[in-house]
Amino acid sequence: MNVNIFKLFSPSRLLEHIVPHPMDSNRPLFLLFDFVHIIKSIRNNWLNQIDYNKTFTYPDFENIQVASTAVFEEIRKLYKSDQHSVAKLAPRLTSKACWPSTLERQNVSLALRIFDESTAAALNVSYQSRYHTSTNSQTADFIAIICNVWKLFNINTPNKGILHKDEFSVPLTYNDTRFMFLQRVVDWAECWRVMPDKRSKLSPQTFTSFRHSCIALPCIVNHLTGNCGYSYVLSSFLQNDPLEHHFGLYRMMSGAQYHISYCQVLETERKIKLSSILKLFSKKPVEDSISLKNFLELCSSSCDQDSMRLSAWRCISRRFRDIQG
C-alpha cells in the first residue's frame, strides 16, 4: 500500500525517492520507508522460508559471485546451547526472539535481538567441542550487514557513536563516507534479487522498500546538510515513531487491544482531544488562564461564537508561551 501511495506522488507514477513539491518547486519531497518495518519484514521473510533450517541464499558481500547461506536454525541452536550457561555467548537471544508467535512478529525489539552484534559475534566463535558448521560465519555475515544498515537508520543522539565506539552510529554529515557502504548494500541487494533461486530470498516488496530506503537516506542527508543549514542529521528522527505512538494510543485507550474497530478509533480521538484540553490550565495566576470547567461552560453557553473562539485562542496562546518560557 505504501508503494502505491508513493507512486501517486510521482508525476511519472513510478516509485521515486525524490518527487517535486506540488506548491513549491524549491522544496523537494523525499519518500522514505520506515526502516523499523523493513527490519521486521526481513526477519519475518527469514522465518517464512519453507525449508526446515529456514535458509537464505544470498551473494557474499565482498564477492557477489559467491553464494552464501544464512540459516536461522543456527541461531536457534546457539540459543539452546546457551540456555543453561551462566556466561552466555549471545545474551540478547531469547526464546521469543527465536520462536516468535504471529503477534510477537510485530515487535521490533525481538527482531533486533536477532540482528545484534553479540549474535553475529557468537556465531563466529568456533566451538569445536560443542558445535560448529560452515554456515555459522555466513549467517553471522548476513546479520552483520543488516545490523550495520540498521545502525545508520537509528542514530538518535549526537554522542551515540562516541559512547558505543561505533563509526556506524556517528551522526550523518554531507557526503558521508558511509554512504559508499549503503551504495554497496544497494548493489548487493540487487544482485540478491536477480539470483535464480526464487525461494531463499526476501519478498519483492521487502526488496523494493529495502533498496529504496538505502538510496533515499543519503539524498535526504545531503539535502538537509547542503541546502537547509544542518551540520549533521540524526536518522532516527526520520522514522515514523510519532505516528506509531499515536496508533499505540488507539490500542491502549481501547482496552489494550491489538485489533480495534473504526468506532473505537473515533472514541479514542475524542479522548485524546479531551486530554489536550486538560492542558489548557496555566500554573501561573494570570487572567488569560482557563480551567477545564470554565472552558466547557464557555463552549456550552450561548455566548457569541467569535468571543468564544477569541477566549479559547488567548488561552492556547498563553499556554504555548508558558511552554516556551
Image (spheres, grey):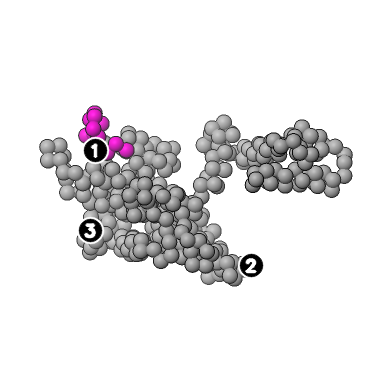
Q: Which residue is mark 1?
A: 89
Residue drawn at point x = 54 percent, y = 42 percent:
245
Closer to the N terminus: mark 1 or mark 2?
A: 2
Q: Which residue is mark 3?
A: 67
What amino acid is found at the position of numbered circle 3 in the picture? Ala
Q: Is residue 279 found left or right of 88 in the rendered image?
A: right
What amino acid is found at the position of numbered circle 1 in the picture? Leu
Badge 2 marks a residue whose secondary structure is loop
Q: Is residue 297 magenta?
A: no
Badge 3 marks a residue whose secondary structure is strand
Where 117 sits versus 285, above or below?
below
Foreground mark, 1 or 2, reads 1
Mark identifier at residue 112: none
What separation in Å lies between label 1 and label 3 (alpha carbons)?
27 Å
Front residue (pair 171, 57): 171
Q: Mostly what secondary structure, the magenta segment?
A: loop
Badge 1 marks a residue whose secondary structure is loop
What separation in Å lies between label 1 and label 2 (alpha carbons)?
55 Å
